[in-house]
Image (cartoon, rainbow, N blue to C red):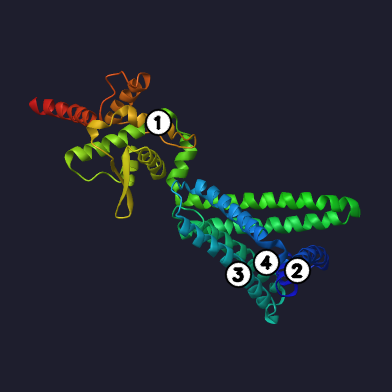
Amino acid sequence: LLGSTIEPWLEMTLGQSPENMVTMREAFTKVIELGESADVTALGFIGVVALLYLVLILLTTVETTLNRIWGARRPRTLMRRAVDYAAILFVIPLGLVLATVLGSGLGDFAWMGGLRGAVREVVAMLAVSGVLTFLYLVMPAARSRFKSALIGGLVAGALWHLGLEAYAQLQIGVARYNVIYSGFATLPLFLVWIFVSWLLVLFGAELAAAHQDESGFRWRVREGEASARTRHRLGVRFTAEIARSFVRGEMPPDVHQHAEESSIPTRLAEDILDDLARHGILLRAHRNGVPTYVLSRDPRTLRLSDVLAALDESADPYELGHPRSDEEAKQLAALVDDLEKAPEGTPANLSLRELVEWLEAEHIEPEQRRHAH
């Protein structure tokens, strides 16, 4: 393993400087020798289970973090998660080995001359970028576009490769000092590099998610975090639109239509609607592959205080959004303000059926008066 994979990878990544190679080869040799000398059978059943558990915890942590970045609120099934984890554990090491072999083979062509070192550097960077792109595509529970994942993977892979070279040079510089002091510095530097590596992976994920949802990212930068009142107003507006469709016998708007009508990102609209669905106000369905929400029961039995209570229990300080300023939005906002002061006793605590009738009257009567004149 050391001669066929590790040394070619070191040459491809760090160059062929003898000083670099000797220092890093010694470190990797010790690690490989330790692994080869380990008796796997001595671990026993409990040891193997513990090892698999640690790997599972690591992958679960990575998935949870990426789900947060992509805004995925609905976890995958256990079977889908097992398949994705197995793919990651198989594809990523295989990809690195193939990239190492490819880089070593390309570097052996004599006609490349002085370009051999540059070719190895590029192949090493592309190998890391490919691994990160695959991670951004497979790991999030939300749908990830290939172009966005590729952009994040290329940027993070390039930064990771540069960071690795800086870390290697720093370790070499430390090794020139007194043996005792250099020994003390090796482990802290390695831990710092692990931390920086994870930051770079997260940066690439943030970049990929921002590219995939540009409107949501711009909104987040412009508007900041949403208040509880904003969530209340949006939730009441969405529920009113769904109840109106129910009363009229029409198809309810999908999540994209809710977002467009309120001038907010789709991700925010889906988060609020999912909160209402989790608390039994709505039911989640799909129309042409797009999430669509319907009332869970008769609108006469659902009151506005139920909507506000569901949103309060699901409050998330990271949500965004402000409804657009039109006449109906202002009316609903005033209604929510009254309801927040006295949710149970105020006359503003209408049922959803009464809310739809009130909105219809507010819009029909002015129209009739205009035609009468």
**Which disc, if any, is residue 121?**
4
Image spot of residue 180 (x, y percent): 90, 52
How crowded is the residue under tag 2: few (<14 C-alpha within 10 Å), some, or many (20+)?
A: few
Image spot of residue 65 (x, y percent): 55, 48
> Which of the marked residues, 3 or 4, is nearer the chain's N terminus?
3
**Is 99 placed left or right of 244 in the picture?**
right
Residue that badge 3 annotates: 94
For the residues labelled 2 and 4, the Cα–Cα distance comes to 29 Å
> Which of the marked residues, 3 or 1, is nearer the chain's N terminus?
3
> Which of the marked residues, 2 or 4, is nearer the chain's N terminus?
2
Residue that badge 1 annotates: 230
**Measuring 56% from the left and 62% from the top, which residue is drawn there?**
88
For the residues labelled 2 and 1, the Cα–Cα distance comes to 59 Å
Q: Relative to residue 336, is residue 179 depicted above or below?
A: below
Query: Of tags 3 and 4, which is closer to the observer?
Result: 3
| CB contact under 8 Å: marks 2 and 4 | no
For the residues labelled 3 and 1, the Cα–Cα distance comes to 48 Å
Image spot of residue 15 (x, y percent): 74, 67
Residue that badge 2 annotates: 36
For the residues labelled 3 and 4, the Cα–Cα distance comes to 19 Å
